[in-house]
C-alpha cells in the first residue's frame, strides 16, 4: 500500500494539471472567439447606427 501511494498522488497531480490546462485552453478559446465575433460585428453595429 505504501509503494502505491506516491504513484496515486502522481496520477492525481497529473489529472489535476490536465483538467486545469483544459479549462485554461477553453477559456482562451472562448475569449478568442468572443473577441473575433465582436470585431466582426463591430462594423455592422457602426453601419446600423
Image (cartoon, grey):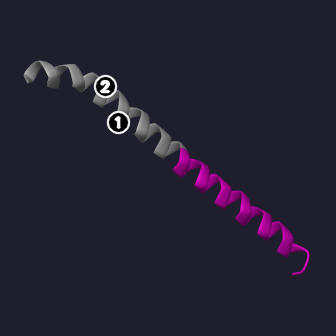
Nearest to viewer (mark 1 / mark 2): 2
- Bin the neighbour count of mark 2 within 10 Å (Cα to Cα): few under 14, some 14-19, many 20 and up: few
Reply above or below: 32 against 6. above
Horizontally, residue 24 falls left or right of residue 36, namely: right
Residue at point 29%, 30% (across, down): 38
Residues 27 and 42: in front is 42
Percent from the top left, x then y, of residue 24?
Answer: 54, 48
Determine which residue is flagged by label 1: 34
Q: What x and y, as percent, mark residue 39?
A: 31, 25
Left or right of 3 on screen, residue 26: left
Marking on residue 39: 2
Chain-order first, disc 1 or disc 2 = 1
Image: 44 above or below 26 = above
Q: Where is residue 3 drawn, in percent x and y?
A: 91, 75
Residue depicted at 46% across the width and 37% down the height = 29
Residue 2 image offset from top left, x and y in percent: 90, 80
Residue 13 lies in the magenta-colored region: yes
Q: Indicate the secondary structure of the residue bearing disc 2.
A: helix
Residue at (52, 51) in percent of width and height: 23
Residue, x 43% and y 33% (percent of image)? 32
Residue 49's image quarter?
A: top left
Do residues under tags 1 and 2 come within 8 Å of each other at their CB atoms? no
Residue 18 in magenta?
A: yes
Specify the principal SS of the magenta part.
helix
* Disc 1 element: helix
Residue 3's tag is none
Q: CA distance from mark 1 to mark 2?
A: 9 Å
Instruction: Characterize the local packing of mark 1: few (<14), some (14-19) or many (20 or more) Cα atoms within 10 angstroms.
Output: few
| Magenta part of the chain | 1-24
Amino acid at each position: 500500500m505504501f509503494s502505491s501511494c506516491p504513484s496515486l498522488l502522481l496520477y492525481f497531480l497529473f489529472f489535476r494539471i490536465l483538467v486545469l490546462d483544459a479549462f485554461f485552453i477553453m477559456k482562451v478559446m472562448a475569449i478568442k472567439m468572443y473577441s473575433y465575433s465582436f470585431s466582426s460585428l463591430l462594423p455592422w453595429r457602426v453601419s446600423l447606427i
